[in-house]
Amino acid sequence: MTDGAGPTTQAPLPAAVPEPAPTAASWYRRRAFLVTAGVVVIVGAAVISDLPTSTSRATDVQGETTVISEINADVAPCVFSVREALTLRADEVGGALSAGNRAQIPGLLRDDQDACSFTDASIFDLSNIEVPGSPAGRDMGQAVNTATLWATSDALEVIEQIQALTTDPTDAKAGRRLAAAERLLAQDATKTAAEVDAGGRTLHTTLPAIDLSTQDAASAGPGTTGS
């Protein structure tokens, strides 16, 4: 086309500039890397959050003392119940109960049995006590386990055999099983005390005791035990 001033030419369009290929500098933009990096960050954060934290000795001692208080509170109903069962057994053997009192024994023993089983909320709480991650945590965790065994196995067996002997005082097998259960009761009480002592030594202190004593019943007469 002309406008009378002479021919004109149209300027050529610039050539398309090819998109540069990914270089080493753009590797972090790739989706696969971003997904992988995100997973690594999340896992790393989880690992870091699970690492034990440093606490002071005073804090550790307080934490383990709190655990012992929780154990004593949770096991107390069972401790009372096994003492009561042993006392009832001693009174039966000693002939110190009237006919009316003897009639109440089966019901009392059923209540004692419940107090030392997992049907009781206190025993369930005992078995679920959380132990702090202090240097003495392993020993205290073992103390929780042994105290739970003391209640749900040893004490429960003692009460059940006393129930059998109340039903049939001539049951020799129940008498032997009661004696064996009383020995385990004392042994596990001693073991729990040793585990608490070990935790105390780790923290260079004397921790409070866990009360698993059946001494109240032992002082009542024959057929009882103490720890």
Image (spheres, grey):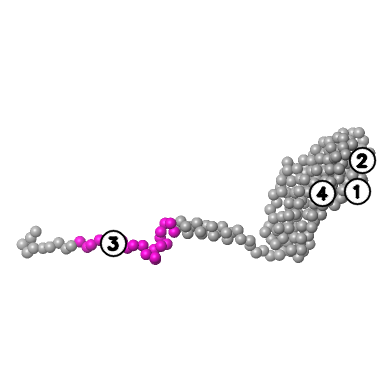
User: Which one is closest to the eye, mark 2 or mark 4?
Assistant: 4
Front residue of this view, candidates 68 and 189? 189
Is there a contact, CB below 8 Å, between mark 3 and mark 4?
no
- Residue drawn at x 31%, y 61% as measured from the top left: 19
Q: Outermost residue, left direction?
A: 4
Q: Earlier in the sequence, mark 2 or mark 3?
A: 3
Q: Earlier in the sequence, mark 1 or mark 2?
A: 2
Spatial separation of the CA atoms under disc 3 and disc 1: 99 Å
What crowding class fits label 2: few (fewer than 14 Cα within 10 Å), some (14-19), or many (20 or more)?
some
Residue located beneath label 4 in the image = 184
Amino acid type at circle 3 is Pro
What crowding class fits label 3: few (fewer than 14 Cα within 10 Å), some (14-19), or many (20 or more)?
few
What range is drawn magenta here? 13-33
Residue located beneath label 1 in the image = 219
Is residue 143 shown left or right of residue 167?
A: left
Spatial separation of the CA atoms under disc 3 and disc 4: 85 Å
Is there a contact, CB below 8 Å, between mark 2 and mark 4?
no
Name the element at disc 4: helix
Spatial separation of the CA atoms under disc 1 and disc 4: 19 Å
Task: Note whether 52 is above or below 216 in the view shown.
Answer: below
Spatial separation of the CA atoms under disc 1 and disc 2: 14 Å
Front residue of this view, candidates 180 and 128? 180
Residue located beneath label 3 in the image = 18
- Residue drawn at x 78%, y 62% as measured from the top left: 206
What crowding class fits label 4: few (fewer than 14 Cα within 10 Å), some (14-19), or many (20 or more)?
some
Name the element at disc 3: loop
Residue located beneath label 2 in the image = 93
Verify whether residue 95 appears in magenta: no
Amino acid type at circle 2 is Val
Verify whether residue 32 appears in magenta: yes
